[in-house]
Amino acid sequence: MEVLTSPRRSFVRWNILGLMVVVSMITYLDRLNIAIAAPQIMAEYHLSSTDMGRIFSAFILAYGLFQLPGGWLADRFGPRGVLSAALLWWSVFTALTAIILNVLPVTLFPVVVTLGVTRFCLGMGEAAAWPGFNRAIANWIPAGERALAASLPLAGGGLGAALTPPLIASLMVAYGWRNPFYVSAVVGVLFAGVWFFYVRNRPTEHPSVNPAELSLIESGLEQRATAGEGDHLSTPWKRILLEPNVWLLFVTNFCAGYAIYIYLTWFYTYLVEFRHLSFVKGSVYTMGPFVAITIMTPLGGTLCDRAAKRYGVTASRRMIAIGGMSFAALALYSGARLPEINLSVFAFSLGAGAIFFAFSAHWATTIDIAKPFAGTVAGIMNWGGNTGGMISPILTPYLAREFGWIPAMEFAASLLLAGSLVWFLIRPEKNSLIAEPCQSGLLRVA
């Protein structure tokens, strides 16, 4: 008697998530390399810490401003082409960061302006990455796997950020500060091609998705959003802009983004100047927060998915977000106060990991409340995070100069605590932006 068995399910959705992890690593490589190169650039061009802060903030300004357009483009045209084009764009400007000062005479074009404009353009491209990831996750990942899926690219960013300092520092010592920018650009161009040729906007378009995987994906997506493709729906701008959940996510991400950008911009300088570590040792210690991010982010996503099955979406998202951000606030406060360098860096590292532990709930919630427009809503939320991030590189050295590094870090901790309290007002189960079929068979927005 022949026994019929179910066909083995393909794993294309996880392969695509794996590519997201790699691309997210590249985004952190391309945004962190200038932070490691900052001491050399400042010495060569006689820049102050305030000048460098303005250059850092130029990237973050563009990155924040273009989150919404990037998310809308991913919703409208799909993450395949949008992310490929964005990756090519920011790779070009990564290379230009090293080239432009040799091309334009500094006597006519001030270094701060030249590098600021270049990093602004780089930020424009990278702004499409995370909303584009969110759009792909909304199309490819069923609800029960959503928080974990959202956490994996975030963890990839942490891994990329952990590997960047020693890698960039080693290349700079051997070949000068410009060479790593060329290497980063080449890696970005290669993976733009890989993303375009492998990824598809939806599971039904991918030749390697078999019926078993397609059935799992479609059965796990909300039925009200099976069409769920923002590229076939008019974006309900009024509903989105008047939705309280959207702006509450903006605020809580603002608080988290302020703290995270200390790690991305001034943490290395803090270790070298305030803690008196050597150039190489400082780059090694800078890995700590990003190793913690790599470990703790998928842990947050896994726990968030499991808690959702037991306690519901709202309770699970709040537990992970409030717990992570509150713990991060305590860790930053402790890290600033501990005199022993190893304990201090360990506390700071746990703080960074805890913020990203909470982020799995942030990103999953954008899909919970607005699946067909997840890219757009994620863009608004991440705009909030990068508004905080734009302020952080300028305000942090000012606070450190006027009051000391300890109060500067404690200010970031207080913002994290305030951001955690916002989650008591966020309602992930309120999915008023999700489209549902009406009697005519078309889609309308609930």
Image (cartoon, helix red, strand yellow):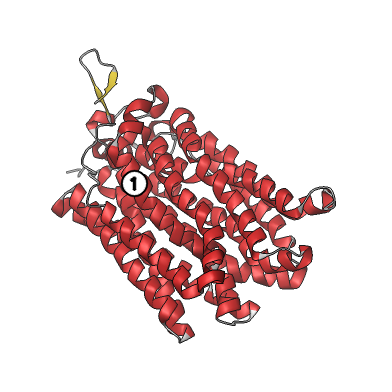
Q: What element carries label 1?
A: helix
Question: Residue at (39%, 28%) from the top-left corner?
Answer: 230
Q: Relative to 201, is 53 on the left or the right?
A: right
Q: Position of residue 397 (x, y in %)?
A: 56, 66
Q: Where is residue 233 in the image (x, y as percent from the top left)?
A: 37, 23
* Residue 82 location (% of width, % of height): 53, 35
Q: Which residue lies furthest to the front in this view?
A: 402
Which residue shows up at 42% across the image and 83% down it?
Answer: 338
Q: Say if residue 352 shows up in the picture.
A: no
Q: Against 345, is 91 above or below?
A: above
Q: Between residues 353 and 91, which one lies in front from this camera angle?
A: 353
Front position in the image: 430 or 374:
430
Can the viewer see residue 315? yes
Residue type, label 1:
Leu
Residue 98 in percent (x, y) is at: 74, 55
In the rendered image, which residue does mark 1 sit on?
249
What is the number of callouts on the image? 1
- Within 10 Å of disc 1 (Cα), the crowding (few <14, some 14-19, many 20+) is many
